[in-house]
């Protein structure tokens, strides 16, 4: 981070903004706090941190929370105006309202009080630029010991993940040759995977699932205080059965992971500092993004693993609720309004829907949770995380635990193929049957978008799906004037076509997707069919196509930090 001095531009801008507000006689907190907000944002940008405004922390609404690159909350901000007695406000907020005390700055235009580790470390006048710089430096440079340990452990773990994966792979392959009980268990499990996920799934992909489970099972057990996870989750239970056979002769689990104790302990120490469950979820999402990028590079490439920013999720869910009321006289809470996230990831969309429904009372939420909320995930680790995130969201709102039976480990596109088959376990099969029989009124989520993998020589190409591919070919492709229609093979295009068919005669499709369909010639047939099939179409083009405009940066100009442009689409179908 560059050294900031009292003469720095961002400091001068702060005082100029305050003077402009004063000249306009605008001294209310809601207005004057913008100057400090801009200052925090400028500081954050230089560290690749982000300031999230109006975050709720255990029912407390903070003016700002600062998150670092690992999505760990590093500091909090509470703004007041000049009419407030800042000392009294600090006492009230800390000891009556229970505001966080590890690193929080209380700020008015002319004064700042900095609390760290429960003690007041600064109480200064901000009329002096030197004091302002001191407050900001102290605020941004605050580090709990756990954070230093985590930064080092995370960097080393990410670097070691490929080597750890290779070692586990050698253990598994040696056991497949020499350990008959393990070989039999592996073969049975592989057959279940091919039936449930992909009939062409290679043994290498099955091996990778075992490795993912072995590397992350402790995270679920300890980070979420979920000691029974591996026994209670219907999919984890099957994988543990295979690993149990491996550990009888070929593998000492505890000995293998003894050298990783420092990483797991560092992770658990940081998690212990995060009291808000939603913050813990953001932290875990970051770990998984890094895990996939470091270990499952091919999987991340094929499936386009990027998690949806919470403000986009919030906007989409609230928009769906608004449109349901305006167009259909319905609500997410109403019986008969089945909701499906076909590509659930770690569960953010379903969790947000649960919170929306929870506003209407426990009885209605309990019914929807049991009967009318559904989702699919094809990858093991996000499936695990989605299960626990959704179940914990229910627990927080209802005060009691109930397993979420609306989630399936399944490939949404594979379910469109007209085949009856067993889907891993009897429980998973029953869930799939229930979902296939439901009439969906809302389909919402973030489908994968990746027209081709990074390395075409990998045996990792995006799958062909006879039913969905035919639908796209007979509609979007047939009516396109383009000569090159390869872009229509992108999974997000298949997702849009699939969803438009799945809601039948009426309902809402809300997706955040690649924005290439808006103006590319290859999508002219798709645009034509969307216009014909839907009563209303809302599209928010969020831009961010770095490939079209090299001047853009994927980190700063794209909501996902990726190369392709992004849009939010909400499609409304009526009878």
Image (cartoon, rainbow, N blue to C red):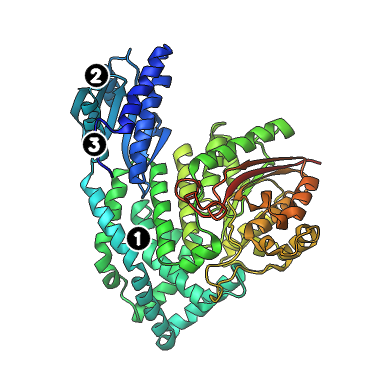
Q: Which mark's residue is nearer the viewer, 1 or 3?
A: 3
* Distance in Å between CA atoms under marks 2 and 3: 21 Å
Q: Residues within 10 Å of mark 2 (few under 14, many from 20)?
A: few
Q: Is residue 394 left or right of residue 509?
A: left
Point out the tag, 2 or 3, that comes first from the N-terminus: 2
Quadrant of the image containing the N terminus: top left
Q: Which mark's residue is nearer the viewer, 2 or 3?
A: 3
- Residue at the disc numbered 1: 218
Query: In the picture shown, does residue 143 fall above or below 235?
Result: above
Q: Quarter-wise, where is residue 47 in the image?
A: top left
Residue 35 circle label: none
Quadrant of the image containing the C terminus: top right
Q: Quarter-wise, where is residue 215 in the image?
A: bottom left
Residue 137 circle label: 3
Point out the tag, 1 or 3, that comes first from the N-terminus: 3
- Look at the numbered discs 2 and 1 and tell me whether their residues touch, using CB distance below 8 Å: no
Element marked by disc 2:
helix
Residue at (50%, 73%) from the top-left corner?
A: 205
Query: In the picture shown, does residue 4 fall above or below 159?
Result: above
Point out the tag, 2 or 1, that comes first from the N-terminus: 2
Q: Position of residue 163 (x, y in %)?
A: 34, 73
């Amino acid at each position: 981070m560059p050294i900031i001095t009292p003469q720095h531009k961002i400091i001068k801008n702060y005082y100029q903004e305050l003077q402009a507000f004063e000249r306009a006689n605008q001294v209310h907190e809601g207005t004057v706090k913008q100057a400090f907000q801009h200052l925090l944002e400028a500081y954050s940008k230089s560290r690749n941190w982000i300031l999230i405004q109006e975050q709720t922390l255990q029912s407390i609404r903070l003016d700002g929370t600062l998150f670092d690159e690992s999505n760990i909350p590093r500091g909090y901000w509470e703004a007041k105006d000049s009419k407030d007695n800042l000392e009294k406000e600090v006492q009230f907020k800390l000891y009556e309202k229970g505001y966080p005390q590890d690193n929080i700055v209380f700020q008015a235009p002319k004064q700042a009080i900095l609390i760290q580790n429960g003690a007041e470390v600064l109480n200064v006048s901000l009329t002096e630029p030197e004091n302002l710089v001191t407050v900001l430096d102290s605020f941004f440079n605050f580090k709990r010991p756990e954070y230093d340990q985590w930064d080092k452990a995370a960097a080393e773990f990410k670097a070691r993940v490929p080597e750890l994966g290779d070692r586990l792979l050698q253990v598994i392959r040696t056991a497949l040759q020499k350990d008959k009980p393990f070989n039999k268990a592996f073969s049975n499990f592989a057959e279940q995977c091919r039936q449930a996920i992909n009939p062409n799934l290679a043994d290498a992909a099955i091996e990778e699932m075992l490795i993912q489970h072995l590397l992350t099972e402790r995270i679920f057990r300890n980070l979420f205080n979920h000691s029974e996870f591996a026994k209670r989750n219907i999919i984890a239970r099957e994988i543990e059965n295979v690993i149990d056979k491996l550990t009888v002769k070929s593998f000492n689990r505890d000995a293998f992971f003894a050298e990783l104790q420092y990483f797991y302990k560092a992770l658990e120490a940081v998690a212990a500092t995060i009291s808000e469950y939603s913050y813990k979820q953001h932290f875990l999402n970051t770990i998984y993004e890094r895990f996939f990028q470091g270990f499952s590079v091919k999987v991340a490439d094929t499936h386009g693993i990027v998690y949806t920013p919470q403000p986009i999720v919030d906007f989409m869910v609230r928009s769906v609720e608004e449109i349901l009321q305006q167009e259909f006289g319905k609500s997410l809470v109403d019986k008969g309004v089945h909701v499906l996230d076909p590509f659930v990831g770690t569960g953010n969309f379903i969790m947000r829907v649960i919170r929306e429904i929870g506003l209407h009372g426990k009885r209605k939420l309990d019914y929807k949770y049991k009967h009318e909320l559904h989702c699919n995930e094809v990858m093991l680790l996000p499936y695990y995380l989605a299960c626990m995130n959704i179940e914990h969201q229910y627990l927080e709102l209802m005060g009691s635990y109930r397993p979420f039976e609306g989630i399936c480990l399944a490939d949404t596109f594979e379910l469109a193929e007209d085949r009856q088959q067993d889907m891993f376990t009897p429980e998973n099969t029953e869930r799939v049957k229930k979902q296939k029989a439901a009439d969906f009124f809302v389909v919402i989520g973030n489908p994968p978008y990746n027209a081709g993998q990074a390395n075409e020589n990998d045996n990792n190409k995006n799958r062909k799906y006879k039913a969905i591919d035919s639908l796209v070919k007979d509609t979007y492709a047939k009516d396109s004037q383009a000569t090159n229609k390869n872009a229509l093979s992108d999974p997000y295009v298949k997702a849009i076509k699939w969803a438009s068919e799945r809601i039948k005669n009426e309902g809402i499709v809300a997706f955040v997707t690649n924005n290439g369909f808006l103006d590319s010639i290859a999508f002219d047939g798709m645009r034509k069919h969307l216009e014909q099939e839907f009563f209303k179409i809302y599209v928010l083009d969020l831009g961010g196509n770095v490939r079209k405009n090299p001047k853009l940066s994927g980190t700063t100009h794209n909501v996902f930090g990726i190369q392709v442009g992004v849009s939010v689409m909400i499609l409304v179908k009526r009878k």
